[in-house]
Amino acid sequence: MKLWKLREKVPAGGVIAPDERLPWHLTIGIGMQHVVAMFGATFLVPLLTGFPPTTTIFFSGVGTLLFLIITRNKVPSYLGSSFAFISPVLAAKAHGGMAAALGGILVAGAVLALVGLLVNYLGSKWINKLMPPVVTGSVVALIGLNLAPTAKANFVLQPGLAIATLSAILLITVLFKGFIGRLSIFLGVVVGWVLAWVLGDLDGSKTHALATAHWLGLPTFTAPHFTINAITLIVPVVIVLIAENTGHVKAVASMTERNLDKSLGKAYTADGLATVLAGLGGGSGTTTYAENIGVMAATKVYSTAAYVVAGLFAILLSLSPKFGALILTMPGGVLGGATTALYGLIAVLGGRIWVDGKVDFRDPANLMCAAVALVIGAADYSWSHGDLSFNGIAIGAVAAIVIYQVMRLIGTRTGALNYELSHPPSTPAAGTTKKN
């Protein structure tokens, strides 16, 4: 049985569907483009969390292949490192080390997989009611704001390099269109990295490790350890993963003009199991990648065959310790410049979710849900009780859901929300006085 129908070229004005493929030499080229597209963001996560880069790349490749199998080749996607894990993973590592953080990642993946099974059984309408766009947008935005201090901490280490890297990212974004413009963060990092090398600002011990690293070898694997503290810190990230997977599936459905609603639960389950695998061996939690949607939009090729190539190529890269040592030579200032833009983009993406979802902020439930959640995330509110500990992302995510649902329930029953929307407060015109 053939997995893909062969098409010799992209038809004029048409696309290559998920169950089709171009000749293998073209498919391989497009698959390698997908690796380049995901690489800029995926390799930053282990750098920021202290995880082995090659291990993360390995599990992203394995996770991608698993995703394609579970979704039955219907949803083209690459599973890269999720930025939603960064802050809670850092907090979990501070309390219990890398093994404890991996335990939290594993449990988060298991919860997402269970949600996927529920969606397969019950349908997806309940997810949309529990987490409408105002909630998912707020959670995504507060993650970017919560990560802002991490960007600043790296920025101030080498301000000159950070400014140069950030400037390169901005210039590449505005000067180049299409595929190159979409790689602005990755290319800006390369510019900053090369500049650091020219100026002699690379860490000597790390460059020595690069010189002595072997070209071939297995990634470093680490077993997880389970603690209540790490689990409570990391599991709320599932809310973000649901939003990211939902957005990806709907975007692909729109571009391919196919109804993929029945694949939504499978996508959750696949990403959840990929994250479980990462937690078992020392990789970062995964999510579907918007960067790769850009490649599909540019090439009009949605073939899952290209993603099989991408997954295999990522696994091949992970088998080179020298490649991992190269990544570790990146200076802190370069990271600071890149993450200043990247974390800002995450925050703004939350706003885009509001716009796309046509969120009405005249509605008090929407307004207060976003307002409280953003402050909790930005200020990194925390709460501890015994072995339990929650950070700003966890508290903010839960607050967004609870505030929206409770205000909606009370407001609907009392009519207060409907009254506010249908009777907005009037503002006296300039120069007039309101009469009693």
Image (cartoon, rainbow, N blue to C red):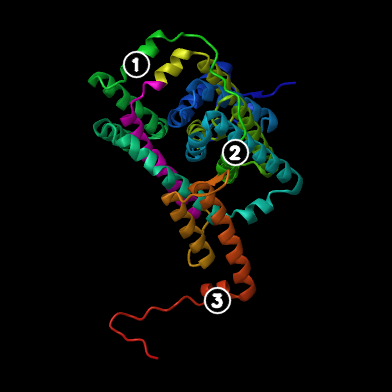
State the image coordinates of residue 196 (x, y, percent, origin top left).
28, 23
Q: How crowded is mark 2: few (under 14 residues within 10 Å), some or many (20 or more)?
A: some
State the image coordinates of residue 366 (x, y, percent, origin top left).
52, 62
State the image coordinates of residue 232 (x, y, percent, origin top left).
59, 43
Q: Give the range drawn in magenta.
A: 328-355
Secondary structure type for disc 3: helix
For the N terminus, the image quarter is: top right
Horizontal side of residue 432 vs 248, given as left or right: left
Q: Residue at x 52, y 23 (%)?
A: 57
Q: Which mark is residue 205?
A: 1
Q: Can residue 250 be seen from the camera position used here?
A: no
Q: How crowded is mark 3: few (under 14 residues within 10 Å), some or many (20 or more)?
A: few
Horizontal side of residue 194 vs 216, given as left or right: left
For the C terminus, the image quarter is: bottom left
Q: Is residue 89 magenta?
A: no
Secondary structure type for disc 2: helix
Secondary structure type for disc 1: helix
Q: Residue 256 carries which label?
A: 2
Q: Residue at x 35, y 12 (%)?
A: 208
Q: Which amino acid does label 3 sit on?
A: Tyr
Check disc 3 and report the residue beneath it.
419
Mark 3 and 1 residues: CB-CB less than 8 Å, in contact? no
Q: Is residue 353 magenta?
A: yes
Q: Which amino acid does label 2 sit on?
A: Thr
Relative to the observer, which residue lies in front, 168 or 30?
168
Q: Which mark is residue 384?
A: none
Relative to the observer, which residue lies in front, 253 or 237?
237
Q: Can residue 410 be seen from the camera position used here?
A: yes
Mark 1 to mark 2 CA distance (whole Å): 49 Å
